[in-house]
Amino acid sequence: MMLIKLAWRNLWRNRKRSIITLTSIAIAVLLAVSMRSMQLGMYDNMIKNVVGSYVGYIQIHGRGYWEEQTLDNALQITPQLRDKVQSIPGVKHLIERIGTFSLGSRGDETKGVMVSGIRMEDERQMVDWDARLLKGELLPPGSEDILLAKGVARFFRADVGDTIVLIGQGYHGMSAAGKFRVGGIVDMKNPKINSVSVFLSLPVAQDYLSAKNVVTHLVIDKAENADEKQMLNRLTTALDTSKYEVMGWREMLPELEQTILADSVGGLLMVFILYMIITFGIFGTVLMMTQERIFELGIMMAIGMKRLKLILTLIYETIILTILGLLIGIALVLPIMYYYHVHPLQLGLDQAEVMEKFGFEATVPFLFNLQLPLTHALIIFIISLVIALYPVIRIWRLNPLEAMRSK
């Protein structure tokens, strides 16, 4: 305890130097954690918008469907298939969808659209559809209305109550045609999905496509802490792979994973540069604290103070300085993380346009996770312990007589 008190007093013998070091550590934590929180929050938002609400974390298709996405490669739903899938640990929800491309028309306007047949009560278990509803109502049970994504509604200049005509090809070459009232308009939180998506109730879509009891996708929503790779392996083992194919979102959307990976590498490089700066900052402080006190250390050793106690005192000084800086940095960054988690950053016009071209929402929510600042604080703490080896080596090799002559 006495050595800790001595270390504390030694730190404030040169207040300006200690305050500068504290500030540099706190700013390093603030910048590193803010940067990673912003990056990871953006990735999490991408995955939730594109994966969670579009392809799902895992999908099951009929064999060959993903390569050639036609209704003829769709799969028949059986109770045995449902039971097998739902028996796999980690499966939270099992959602049936049927999807195909059709030609949409209203007045003189025509556009290719992606028609998705869904059960709204099942979809709501995975995604908050009420938050996406802009006008009208979602598809209640028994509804024969159509739900338009806002980009499609804007193209057709359609509002609730208007009529959209769909023409396409149904199951096994059957003709598909139908006239549907617009029941609601939704925002899918992704520009590309908004520009092509329309939704029907699953039974209505199956009737439109002459595809009773047929679906193109079985979408699996996993439990929060479930291991996605384990689930994929178990599903592949449990199902007949000559009839079904099981795919994770990384396989279905490799470009999304590559985008995240490439951006993450750039972010980690910036964090590494920050760590290098803070390493030299702490080392500079420790070097000065040691060199300035060589004479003092020699005197203390000459009057009988053991080397080990001197070493511990300087180590305590480094640790106290680092911990104080880390605590200040964490105290500063937590409110920022929380605020921008609740109120995401809205990108400017040019940046928003670039993001939307890549199919991502032009908002950047921060990830609020206590593990993030603690991880970066631990890394900086380990760096400080490594730096503390310098005074250990310097004192261990110190000759008291030479030290006293250095004055």
Image (tube, rainbow, N blue to C red):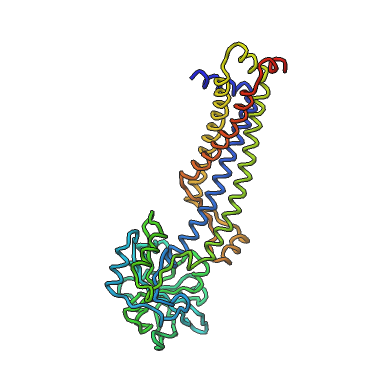
Q: On the rendered structure, is 278 left or right of 68?
A: right
Q: Quadrant of residue 31?
A: top right
Q: Is residue 403 above or below residue 173?
A: above
The x and y percentages for residue 200 are: 38, 75
In front of the other: 225 or 28: 225
When asked about the image quadrant of residue 259, the answer is: bottom right
**How many numbered marks, from 0 up?**
0
**Residue sitting at x 54%, y 49%:** 36
Q: Position of residue 8 (x, y in %)?
A: 55, 22
Of residues 259 and 180, the one drawn nearer to the viewer in this rendering:
259
Q: Does residue 407 appear anywhere in the picture? A: no
Residue, x 61% and y 29% (percent of image)?
A: 19
Is residue 362 something that shows in the picture?
yes
Residue at image point 46% right, 73% down: 197
Q: Is residue 60 above or below residue 326?
A: below
Judging depth in this view, the residue of 402 and 66 nearest the camera is 402
Q: Position of residue 343 (x, y in %)?
A: 49, 51
Q: Quadrant of the C terminus?
A: top right
Depth check: 74 or 12 in front?
74
Q: Where is residue 1 drawn, in percent x and y?
A: 48, 20
Residue under the point 51% across and 53% down: 40
Q: Residue furthest top?
A: 303
In the picture, measured across the screen, residue 11 lies left or right of residue 243, that is right
